[in-house]
Every structure is written in C-alpha cells, then in structure tokens.
Image (cartoon, rainbow, N blue to C red):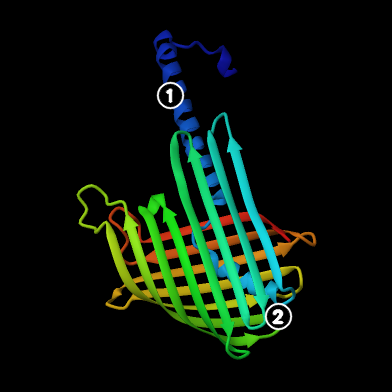
Amino acid sequence: MEDSLLPRPRALARTSEPSKWKGARQVVWWRRRQLGAVLLFFSASSTASAQVNVESLRADLRKTPALASLEGAFTGRTGNVESVVVGGAAFGAARWGRHSFFATTQADYARFGSETRVSKSFLHARYDYALTPVVSGELFAQQQQDKFQRLLLRELLGVGPRFLVADQEELRVAVGTAYMIEYERISVAPGAPDDNVTFNNRWSSYASGTWSPDSRVRAIGTVYVQPRFDDFGDVRVLLEGALSTQVLERLGVKVIATVRHDTQPPTTVKRTDVEIKNAFTLKF
C-alpha cells in the first residue's frame, strides 16, 4: 500500500511541518555559505603577484620596445547569494638600450551580503640596468594595503643584482637578491601587543623560471624569501605560479596561484594565505 494511503496521527502531522521547514532553512543557509566560499575562492585576485607579472613582461619585452596589458574580472550575484566581486590590474613595460622599466598596479574588492571579504590595492615599479648579458642591477619600490591582513600601509624600497642563469627560447631562469627597506603601518587588534608602526631592513632573495612550450602557452613560477636582518626568525615567504594561454593575438586567459607565509603576522592574522585568480588579459 502506498504511504499516501496510510493514516497520519494528527499530533505528528502538526509537529513535523515546522521541523521540515527548519531543516530546509538550514540547508539553504549552508548552501549559500558554500556557494559564497566557492565564488570567493575562484574570483579573488592575488595581492602580491608583481614578480610573476614582471617576469611575464620581461619575456614579451624582448620582442618589442614597449608594451601594456590589462586584466579584469567582475562577478555579481543576487537571489540566494548576494555578492559583488570586482578586480582589476594594469601592467606596463619599456626597454631602451640597457634600461628596462616595469610597473604594475592592482585593486580587488569582494562583498558577500553585508560582509566585505576582500579589500586591497597594490602598486609596484621596477627599474633594471643591464651590466652584462647575464647580470643586471635592479631598483624597485612598492606600496600596498590589505584590510584583512590589518595592513593599512606598506611601503618598501630595494636595490640589488639579478643574474640570468638560463636564457633559451623555451626556458628562462633568473635569481636575484636585494637589500630592502620596509615601512609598515597596521591596524592593531584590541588588546594586542603589536606596534602600530614598524621600520625594518630585510634581505629579499628570489628565483624565477619561465617555461614556454610553444608561442601560445607560458608557465611562470617564482619564490621569494625575505628575512629581517636583525631577526632571521621573522621571515616572509612568497610562492607564485601563473599559467597563461593566448586565445587570440591580443586576448588571453590566465590562472595565478599565490601562497604567502609570514612567521610573525599581526595578532589575529593567520600565518599562511592561499589565493587563486582566474582572469582575462588584453595586450596592447
């Protein structure tokens, strides 16, 4: 006999309906949280991908004296999930004789419901002077802010040598090291012992590799290590990787993954962050 023909006790019928709707509301709430997390994971941009982008610009700059590119992403949702995710970036480079200039700027904002999940901006400029075909001197400056790392402002200036270890059509490997001056102002958590303003001297070293199996596909990986000179236990590590594919002559798609680790972050900030960015790129 079908269940619909069985008698239902009145008391059970009265109490089962509210429980059913309560369970449904919990499922909807959980699905919204899951979908929001997925959207944030795949739409958020990385904060400090300057070196990866600079290495990509270096490879393109060998074919032209100047270039520029734009990246952008926008995602809006309404209904079960109320969200807005906006990200944009601009890159430029120029070469004249032994001189090379690079600049990148990025900004990202994400809001889910009434809660801001991402709010950050980034500006990086770099100058290279080729001393020999494999050795060059670098001067760079950077400004950054990130609400969720309690970073109100970070400014740095660095100088050092860069060495080209491998320089072939498919593979390009370089290493560099620099002395870096860093100024930081953070939003101190209530009751935390952190200093609001710090001024540090760091040793910044990196290794970067670019692999191009063909003219349309390029993979780039970079690792940074930045300890403080007066406290080598205070070190920052940055791992970045990017895979780009040219769809058309000027249009491409890119996936960028970033892992950051800080052994002494501000109070309430986690030591390790992982970010993934999917973007379209337009070259000029």
Q: Which quadrant would the C terminus be assigned to in this image?
A: bottom right
Residue 13 on image: x %, y %:
44, 13
Task: Name the amino acid, label 2.
Answer: Glu
In this picture, residue 58 sits left or right of residue 139: right
Per the model, the C-alpha gap separating discs 2 and 1 is 59 Å
Quarter of the image holding residue 56?
A: bottom right
Q: Name the residue: 67% across, 64% down.
A: 244
Residue 170, label in figure: 2
Front residue of 176/98: it is: 98
Quarter of the image holding residue 173?
A: bottom right
Front residue of 241/90: it is: 90
Asked if 114 appears above or below 168 in the picture, the reply is above
Residue 257 on image: x %, y %:
55, 62
Asked if 64 appears above or below 124 in the picture, the reply is below
Asked if 15 appears above or below 143 in the picture, the reply is above
Asked if 119 appears above or below 46 in the picture, the reply is above
Question: Which element type, helix, strand or loop, lies under badge 2?
Answer: loop
Precedes in sequence: disc 2 or disc 1: 1
Residue 94 on image: x %, y %:
66, 71
Quarter of the image holding residue 74?
A: top right
In this rendering, the label closer to the viewer, 2 or 1: 2
**Residue that lies at the very extreme toward the right in this rendered image:** 249
Question: Which element type, helix, strand or loop, lies under badge 1?
Answer: helix
Residue 22, label in figure: 1
Q: Alpha-carbon neighbours of circle 2 within 10 Å: few (<14), some, or many (≥20)?
A: few
In this picture, residue 14 sits left or right of residue 83: left
Q: Name the residue: 46% across, 68% down.
A: 238
Task: Name the amino acid, label 1.
Answer: Lys
Front residue of 134/267: it is: 134
